[in-house]
Image (cartoon, rainbow, N blue to C red):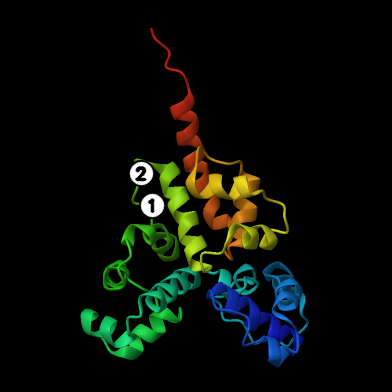
Amino acid sequence: MDEAIGVVVVRQRAQGMPLADLAPIARLTEDRLRKKYDPLSVDRALATRDRPKPVASAQNTASGASIPTLRQPGQRLACALTLMRNGSGRRQRELAEKMGVHESYISRMLSGQRDVSWSHVRIICEVCGTDPELMKPLWEVSADVQPSDTDDPVEYLRTYLRGLHYASGSPEPRVVLAAAQHTLSANDVHRALHGPGVPDWPVIDRLTIALQSLPNLARPLWRRAQTAAEGASSPTVLS
């Protein structure tokens, strides 16, 4: 039961929803829920929990089975799109009519049960009044395609991180710092999301974990950004 409450608390926070509704059920204050069920401790508890395992198919891998669902790239995109729709007040029916699909199709996309095409992401963004460029890196990572913006890898990394921040409910800096167990500073977070420059890898690593994502997805983006930043800062040698 304790583990089930932890999962619900983490999902509630990832969706940007208040914990007030859960407090009376768990018989704990909102502050206690936040401290007791921080994402990292819940991840560890679930990863080490001894429970019966179903027969794995040939397509499953041990590493993939141990990754918490909420951190999967498709789920981060689904969380972002869900928050976008909720914030805009648009109904799923409107999105379905715009796309020419059944409303249940929209429901499965927004819950992360179905892959989302880029054209559908654009429609959701346009209907909800959000710039689709904010969602593009999130979608490209979830779809496992090469980054489309090769001209500015630094800004691409920042946009990806801002997308993760949005998908986490746009938490205030103090919330992000608490999720990172205060291993980051407010300046680290601001620099990673908005610049200047490219922070060292440990900052990106801890930030992506705090934002409910997987560091290995951000690492190649960080490498590209770091290489571009180093190239831009290198003095030109005249012959």
* Residue that appears at 59% across and 74% down: 13
Residues 28 and 196: in front is 28
Q: Are marks 2 and 1 in contact (CB under 8 Å)?
A: yes
Element type where label 2 sits in the image: loop
Q: Residues within 10 Å of mark 1 (few under 14, many from 20)?
A: some
Q: Residues within 10 Å of mark 2 (few under 14, many from 20)?
A: few
* Residue that appears at 63% across and 68% down: 63
Q: Is residue 35 above or below residue 203?
A: below
Element type where label 1 sits in the image: loop
Residue 24 image position (x, y, % from top left): 70, 91
Residue 150 image position (x, y, % from top left): 36, 44
Figure quadrant of the C terminus: top left
Figure quadrant of the N terminus: bottom right
Q: Taking 143 as reference, is 44 left or right?
A: right
Residues 39 and 51: in front is 39
Q: Which mark is residue 227?
A: none
Q: Residue furthest top?
A: 239
Q: Taking 154 as reference, is 118 left or right?
A: left
Quarter occupied by residue 179: bottom right
Q: What residue type is disc 2 on?
A: Thr
The residue that label 2 is drawn on is 150
CA separation, marks 2 and 1?
7 Å
Residues 99 and 62: in front is 99
Residue 43 image position (x, y, % from top left): 69, 72
The residue that label 1 is drawn on is 147
Q: Taking 124 as reference, is 6 left or right?
A: right
